[in-house]
Image: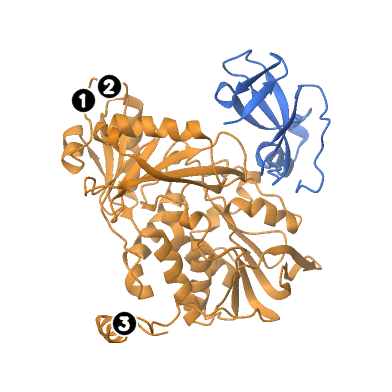
Chain colours: A orange, B blue
Amino acid sequence: MKKYSGFSLFKNALSYHENWQNLWRSPKPKDDYDVIVVGGGGHGLATAYYLAKVHGITNVAVIEKGYLGGGNTARNTTIIRSNYLWDEAAQLYELSLKLWEGLSQELNYNVMFSQRGVLNLGHNLQDMRDIERRVNANRLNGIDGQVVTPERIKEIAPLINISKDCRYPILGASWQPRGGTARHDAVAWGYARGADALGVDLIQETEVTGIRRKNGAVVGVETTQGFIGARKVACVTAGNSGVVAAMAGLRLPVESRPLQALVSEPVKPCLDTVVMSNAVHGYISQSDKGDLVIGAGVDGYNGYGQRGSFHVIEHTLQAICELFPAFSRVRMNRQWGGVVDTCPDACPIISKTSVDGLYFNCGWGTGGFKATPGSGYVFADTVANDHPHPLAAAFNVDRFNTGALIDEHGAAGVAH
Amino acid sequence: MLLIHCPHCREDREEEEYSYSGEAHIVRPLEPEALSDEDWGDYLFFRKNPRGIHHEMWYHAVGCRRYFYATRNTLSYEILETYKVGEQPQVRAQGAVQ
């Protein structure tokens, strides 16, 4: 892999930028791998990267039915934060945030990580009590956070409406300055390029159609390119996790639903932070290109269609227009939906299964993007050692039978 | 926007009138105390979540305020039938992951 630098930019300019190397190879699948990662989104590619980088396991293939990073990785609102209530979740997302802070250097690829801060607004007394509790919990876990007043919110985001004369007045917010956004595509491409350079085979346009087992252990996967052997199979397939689990005769406590987002036409810089509100349910930031990136909620019912109900968008835009009256004239450019696998406790599943050599990393629901580096890191460790990473242990699928749930649902889990 | 036929009201109404109540035909265990943790967890949390035909429960929240069942394709979103609680579906999953 050729390193990107100021010098390489200059050198390639001399040949009119026509000789940049490809980011990754497009290899034919081998007959056999140590580990097969099913799903070439951000989490899957990060898993493959850390397997190779941290654990020295390079005989790895990532099998993706479409193209790399073409699913939810390309369909999210790119918000990054770690201000979760419970210790288990907070530590996992904080590991992720720390990895984000060095990710562009680590990958030698600019993921445009921007720590522009995240505001979570409170609109009633109970919101504010929850926010104070969460910020206190965060600070005990070494995570930055402050409770801020409406006046301070107005300083951070001047276009916001802090008038008391509205249906959902803003009473305050939690503020995490280290939170922010990153460029979603670049994250997938950076991990893919890094993994490929370490010897990982990235196999695109190949769908896994079955998981072959022998004596209760995985021996490989059936794909549209034929059978590929593997000692371990790590599934990171987001909304289709239930479908993949069924291939191995397993059930997961996830339900798949479409989650929508939309972007506006590009406008001049007007919002240099991320604003989220659970109560009115909308979240918004502005990309470097100038579009307002707006996240809506999940549909009310299960679905695998990568689209969503119109009234969900309408509801979100009502909230955005109330928070930012100036945006009521902004026209929306594009809308899209991705299928997310929601867990009953709004926390992920990073787990071994009852089948030897089969692992699942799923259930991230509406908030997986922020966890991409940490998720890949702890999942790679879990797969490599056949034992849960200390930060992943609590996210075992068994928690739905033992009752040790990590209930982020009411705490931080509504708007991601 | 789905148009959902309420079998009680016998009218097609917009989906905003309804709320979703998840998988249908889940029977509460008659003797919960006799169940193992495994079985109780399965009853509470593990759902079929098929990519295809799904039997599910809906609530006509701003209409008759009664529950009913629907058979819907979760990929195409086509609603194949709606029927009252206590009735059995006419269409059943074939080839769908169940």
- The percent coordinates of residue B26 (x first, y second) are 74, 32
- Mark closer to the chain start, 3 or 2: 3
- Determine crowd level at label 2: few under 14, some 14-19, many 20+ residues with C-alpha closer than 10 A: few
Residue A273 against residue A359 in the figure, above or below = above
Disc 3 to disc 1, C-alpha distance? 54 Å
Location of mark 3 (residue): A16
- Mark closer to the chain start, 3 or 1: 3
Please indicate whether residue A170 sits to the left or right of residue A89 in the image. Answer: left
Location of mark 1 (residue): A163
> Which amino acid does the dot numbered 3 rest on?
Tyr
- Residue B28 position by quadrant: top right
**Label pair 2/1, CB-CB below 8 angstroms:** yes
**Callouts 3 and 2 in the same chain:** yes
Location of mark 2 (residue): A166
Residue A218 against residue B62 in the figure, above or below = below
Question: Circle 2 sits in a helix, a strand or a loop, which is it?
Answer: loop
- Residue A128 position by quadrant: top left
Q: Chain of mark 3?
A: A
- Determine crowd level at label 1: few under 14, some 14-19, many 20+ residues with C-alpha closer than 10 A: few
> Which amino acid does the dot numbered 2 rest on?
Cys
Residue drawn at (52%, 58%) of the image: A392
Disc 3 to disc 2, C-alpha distance? 56 Å
- Determine crowd level at label 3: few under 14, some 14-19, many 20+ residues with C-alpha closer than 10 A: few
- The percent coordinates of residue A205 (x first, y second) are 62, 67
- The percent coordinates of residue B45 (x first, y second) are 65, 40
